Amino acid sequence: MKLKKTRKPTIYLASDHAGFVLKEKLKQYLTRSGYDCKDCGPFRYEPLDDYPDYMIPAAQNVARHKSSRGVFMGGSGQGEGIVANKVKGVRAAVYYGGNREVVRLSRDHNDANVLALGARFVSEAEAKKAVKLWLETPFSGAVRHTRRLRKIKLFERSG
């Protein structure tokens, strides 16, 4: 019996100045873990940059490539999550430390395809644990969760 090899999703990374260092660390970590990472910027520290300039293209890539995921970093992660959720087809969850159960539930219940991290609130080690958990947690596919996601998709279409 031959086992089917599951392909790891492509990960789109983006940050602003506050998340830049964490993005670079996570890019190394994810690459070493066998993920194909696409860095959507910034590519150097820019103290006056604006997070929408990087989050919008990254979120559009996640929406376009259905099996991909996004990991976005900013000071709190809140702005990054907000702008990502403006892109049709993106379901972003925000994590800024503490109980990682919220990270697991964002995948298990909500099939989140973007995780926004608050770089001013999580250590590198905590971010790695959260991202690993998030990437390894599948969507449950439970009827109630599928029904709710279908309602969100319908709203996205009709407004």
Image: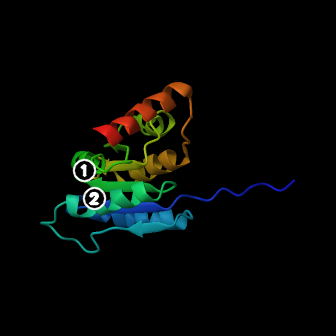
Q: Which residue is mark 1?
A: 83
Residue 2 in sight from this viewpoint: yes
Closer to the N terminus: mark 2 or mark 1?
2
The local crowd at label 1, few if under 14, some if 14 to 19, many if 20 or more residues have their Cα within 10 Å, is some
- Residue at 87 percent across and 53 percent down: it is 1
Q: Which residue is mark 2?
A: 56
Of the pair 19 and 91, the residue shown nearer to us: 91
**Label 2 is placed on what type of residue?**
Ile
Quarter occupied by the C terminus: top left
Note whether 57 is above or below 107 in the view shown.
below
Mark 2 to mark 1 CA distance (whole Å): 7 Å
| Numbered disc 1: secondary structure | helix
- Name of the residue lying farthest toward the left: 48
Q: Position of residue 149 (x, y in %)?
A: 44, 34
| Numbered disc 2: secondary structure | helix
**Cβ atoms under marks 2 and 1 closer than 8 Å:** yes
Note whether 159 is above or below 38 in the view shown.
above
Note whether 55 is above or below 85 in the view shown.
below
Side (left or right) of 150 relative to 98: right
Side (left or right) of 56 relative to 4: left
Q: Position of residue 114 (x, y in %)?
A: 39, 49
Q: Position of residue 22 (x, y in %)?
A: 33, 60
Residue 51 in sight from this viewpoint: no
- Residue at 47 percent across and 63 percent down: it is 29
Q: Position of residue 141 (x, y in %)?
A: 56, 34
- Name of the residue lying farthest toward the right: 1
Of the pair 34 and 140, the residue shown nearer to us: 140
- Name of the residue lying farthest toward the front: 158
- Name of the residue lying farthest toward the top: 144
**Label 1 is placed on what type of residue?**
Val
Q: How many marks?
A: 2
